[in-house]
Amino acid sequence: MPIIFWGSRGLTSRLDSGRFYCPQCDGKSQYDLKQVRPFFTLYFIPLFPMGRAERYVECQRCGGTFKEEVLDMEPPSEEQRQLHRILDQLADGQSLDDAEDELVEAGMDRGQARDLIDEVSGKTWTCSGCNQRYLKGVPRCRTCRAR
């Protein structure tokens, strides 16, 4: 009895290339716009296409793959970068009050800084020893080490 090998595999083709903002590299990089199309195979030879082709963008620097919409993304503004940095610092244990002071030092109005911190912080707790405010997940106060 003869053995028949059949199946499917994707064939990839490059459609375009250029420069784009890569969110993984956080900078401008070269990209390839690629397309993968599934083919029916017989004895590992692709015979005819099956289904729809899927398109994606591949960064040539980091190898990250993204939906095609990434080509329309703009790099984050300096304010957005600063906000992400502050959110990371809050998650690492910085007090909300210190983050607010940092925003004011960067040129933001105190009221705007307080509103922004309150908007992004969610649930918080206040240290009973020094009255510094922290995100709920922060286990202890950085200032007086109280819980």
Image: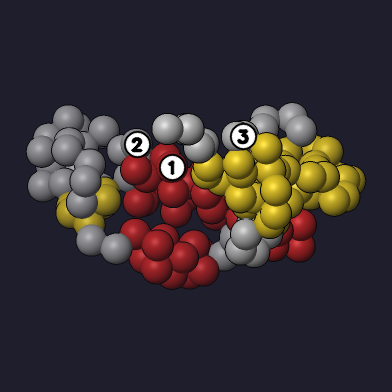
- Residue 7 in sight here: yes
Q: Quadrant of residue 60?
A: top right
- The residue under the point 54% across, 53% down is 83
Question: Residue 67 or 78: which is nearer the viewer?
Answer: 67
Q: Position of residue 23 (x, y in %)?
A: 65, 46
- Mark 3 lies on a secondary structure that is loop
Q: Quadrant of the C terminus?
A: top left
CA separation in Å, label 2 and label 1: 6 Å
- The residue under the point 79% across, 49% down is 33
Question: How dense is the environment of label 2, judged by Cα within 10 Å: few (below 14), some, or many (20 and up)?
Answer: few
Q: Amino acid at mark 1?
A: Asp
Q: Position of residue 132 (x, y in %)?
A: 25, 48
Where residue 88 is drawn, which disc sits there? 1
- Marks 3/1 in contact by CB < 8 Å: the verdict is no
- The residue under the point 37% across, 45% down is 90
- The residue under the point 42% across, 32% down is 1
Question: Residue 141 or 81: which is nearer the viewer?
Answer: 81
Where residue 92 is drawn, which disc sits there? 2
Question: How dense is the environment of label 3, judged by Cα within 10 Å: few (below 14), some, or many (20 and up)?
Answer: few
Q: Position of residue 142 (x, y in %)?
A: 26, 33
Residue topped by disc 3: 44
Q: Amino acid at mark 2?
A: Asp
- Residue 106 in sight here: no
- Marks 2/1 in contact by CB < 8 Å: the verdict is yes
Q: For this view, does 15 lie left or right of residue 36? A: right
CA separation in Å, label 3 and label 2: 52 Å
Q: How many marks?
A: 3
